[in-house]
Amino acid sequence: MPSDTTIKNGIDLHTHCNPSVFPRKLTVWEMVKEAKENHLGGIVLKSHESSTSDQASVINMMQSEVHVYGGIVLNEFVGGLNPASVDVALKMGGKFVWMPTISSEQHIRYFRGKEGRLFQGIDDIFHSSKGICLLDKSGKLKPEIYDILHLIKKYNAVLCSGHISVDELKVLADAAFQEGIEKFLITHPDMDIAPVPIDYQKELATRGAFLEKCYLAAGSNFKNTSVNQLKKSIDKIGHKHCVLVTDYGQSFNIKPIQAMKEFIDTLTGMGITDSQIRTMYVDNPNYLVG
């Protein structure tokens, strides 16, 4: 397992916990406890179904040893592509804005009906089968996206791509870079829910984006890639623009910190150095939340 020095101050930018309408392994307070015990730099609360900005703020009021970061995923449950929801989430201290995930047209087209235990109970909540697309019929970004990008820039928040298609991503990326957004994180580009070709991943990195290298994508839940393939993609993109994430927190999986330690241990066994690990798990995440 990786040493305490290697993971000290690390932040997994992609985990899930309770409260949630989906079964989760840990409560947010248990996540904070795990982070303290492992001397992590913070935790990020991501919820497909609600803003976590207020929840993070309350937890930070109650303790200061581990900073908790929240944000908002622009799914149907918060009004979709809703600048008002983004504004309030960021005003309340949120740090992340994810484009649609389980409400995205891309996700529904690829994954609806195949969720299995990953999204237990999704059929029991009101949810459209149509899906949200960032583009209008002419292939241009919808006007509200520009308002959202302006807010992300204004609050120095992190724009995350969510589960959108690569066609949407290309248009979004052009607009984000034009807006001057400095913190742009591509959500699990190696997962088939929203795959991004490696050459375009590299292009995004050269333009300043960061790319998640996601352990869940290589696990038995998806089997979309392998840790060896993720290692090769890190080599091609360059570790300075990658972040290590787990996307863990599901009730049937191991705890996120256990998953991260497994991920790091496997990568180091393949030749990734401790210095590179710290760049991807400590330095880059801390820059993004800073």
Image: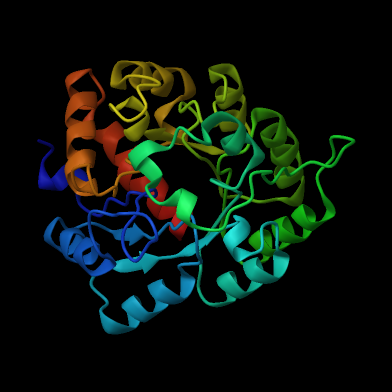
- Can you name the residue that lies furthest to the bottom here? 61
The C terminus - image quarter? bottom left
Q: Quadrant of residue 118?
A: top left
In the depicted structure, whether residue 232 falls above or below residue 220: above
| Residue at x 51% of width, y 67% of height | 51
- Can you name the residue that lies furthest to the right here? 138
Q: Quadrant of residue 202?
A: top right
| Residue at x 61% of width, y 49% of height | 99
Q: Nearer the viewer, residue 81 or 160?
A: 81
| Residue at x 85% of width, y 39% of height | 140
In the rendered image, residue 212, in percent from the top left (x then y), is placed at: 44, 37
In the rendered image, residue 175, in percent from the top left (x then y), is placed at: 76, 44
Exactly how many numbered labels are in the figure?
A: 0
Lateral position of residue 51 relative to residue 37, left or right: right
The N terminus - image quarter? top left
In the rendered image, residue 95, in percent from the top left (x then y), is placed at: 50, 63
Q: Quadrant of residue 104?
A: top right
In the depicted structure, whether residue 118 falls above or below residue 44: above
In the depicted structure, whether residue 199 falls above or below residue 34: above
Q: Nearer the viewer, residue 220 or 259?
A: 220
Colour convention:
rainbow
**Residue 65 shows up from this direction:** yes
Q: Nearer the viewer, residue 33 or 223?
A: 223
| Residue at x 24% of width, y 25% of height | 267
Lateral position of residue 47 relative to residue 34, left or right: right
Lateral position of residue 21 relative to residue 219, left or right: right
In the rendered image, residue 75, in percent from the top left (x then y), is placed at: 59, 55
**Residue 245 shows up from this direction:** no
In the depicted structure, whether residue 227 falls above or below residue 45: above
